[in-house]
Amino acid sequence: MGDLTCDVAVIGAGTAGLAAEHHARKVGASTLLIDPHFAGTTCATVGCMPSKLLIAAGDAVWSIRHAEEFGIAASPRIDGRAVMARLRRERDRFVAGLQKDIARIPEATRIAASAAFCGPDRLRLSDGRTIKTRAIVIATGAAPAVPEVFSAVKDRVLTNESLFELADLPASVGVIGAGPLGLELGQALARLGVRVELFDLGDKVAGLQEREVSDTLRALLEAEFPIHLGAGPEAEPCAEGVRLSWNGQSRDFERLLVAAGRPPNLDGLELDAAGVGRDEKGQPVCDPETLRCGTSAVFIAGDANGHRPLLHEAAHEGVIAGRNAAALPDVTAFSRYVPLALTFTRPEAAVVGHIPDRDEDHASAEARYDDQGRARVEARLGGLVRLHARRRDGRLVGASLCAPDGGHLAHLLAWAISAKLTVADLLDMPFYHPTLEEGLKPALRALCAEIGAAADETRREDSPCA
């Protein structure tokens, strides 16, 4: 086998890597896509899709258990093996569709191997060949971190890469990590009849920066399973499986689900040979608008750069990195999406845009869903939305929330921020009755009043639903 050459070499065939290779090839660059397995994206295999399948099963149980609120008598019978079999069956359908897309990439472009740098523009493959290239895109994704403190019970540890392969639901699970992944999976398992308790050293949940929203979400979730914040439990084997001890307490669980973060997967790349600057954590430093590492020929996209480890961001970063790698040395600074991060708990939580410090330049207001009309109709009461706007022009800049169908509300707010709308602009728009969107109006009105923009509002004050 001889050595290879190309214009753009992409390491990793996940969401970012597939997008980078496609867009580099689309503009005329010769490309090579390097991956040892070509197994599919994190989203399809062990992330977004299987986790939502588990959440959907939990939602079905929840609906049955709470049907009595509507005068309907019902009780669920949970078949854990059937739940997990359906999850894998549907997950595998998503993966199969992705595999068809991968198969459409020219066969000569796909290199089934691992890669490491042996120079700023050269890669060494695990099959012994080398690649000489004009530009390299690192898109190696991320992998779950399992802290050393849990090594004594490693045979009982689950991560998002192993949970979905269980043949049956466990009887009990201790969850480590109050981020989106830990909360989503913990709540879904609890709804499916698993005894769940969650632990985190921090003092907030779901990556929510604002204390009021975090505390609201925590209180709503704790109606279903205990959440221990400020707790870093120690683990040891026990007859049931794992004993967790913290703050003078202990509890036994069958399994331990570690959702303590997914650091960039950079091991084995031999980055010292790449000639790129790195931060104190060893992470390559890149320009977030070009994804280029300094003045090198190296770009880094998706979860591998640790900036915004979300699927829609990985896809966008793949486009940016692929196009810029193909155009090197002429690179373009791309506008980035308004930040949007969702947690698919019930209620859903989100952080949108920029959450400013509490200062005189910004105004903030909130709306509660404790007695909101549509939420009451659907027996989904509870939640809080905090909106932030600039005083000088009334533009919406950010929001954090937990609310029924909060993902839909978050999208509307992200689009409004992208369009540079003011709070008065939003109040000029139609709010159908009865909807969850109506629940935003108290916060929007309070913001208008505070920043002196109420005079621009044209809503009908005589409306019975205003």
Image (cartoon, rainbow, N blue to C red):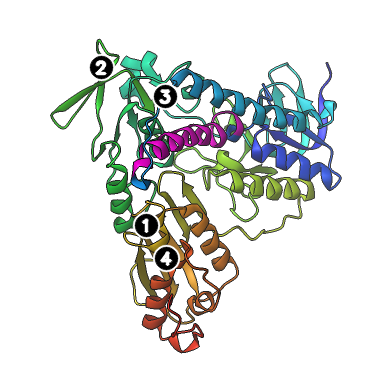
Q: Residue at x 42, y 42 (%)?
A: 180
Q: Tell me if mark 3 has few (under 14), some (14-19) or many (20+) residues whose alpha carbon lies within 10 angstroms of its own.
A: some
Instruction: Tell me how far mark 3 sits from mark 1, CA to CA.
Output: 28 Å
Instruction: Tell me how far mark 3 sits from mark 2, CA to CA.
Output: 30 Å
Which percent across, then down, holds residue 69? 34, 46
Say if mark 3 contacts mark 1, CB within 8 Å.
no
Which residue in the structure is indicated by mark 2? Answer: 236
Q: Nearer the viewer, mark 1 or mark 2?
A: 1
User: Is 180 placed left or right of 149 in the picture?
Assistant: right
**As shown in the figure, which amino acid type bears the numbered disc 1?**
Arg
Q: Residue at x 61, y 47 (%)?
A: 312
Quadrant in which the N terminus is drawn: top right
Mark 3 or 1, nearer chain start: 3
Q: Tell me if mark 4 has few (under 14), some (14-19) or many (20+) residues whose alpha carbon lies within 10 angstroms of its own.
A: many
Which residue in the structure is indicated by mark 3? Answer: 78
Q: Nearer the viewer, mark 4 or mark 1?
A: 1
In the picture, the disc for residue 439 is 4
Which residue in the structure is indicated by mark 1? Answer: 376
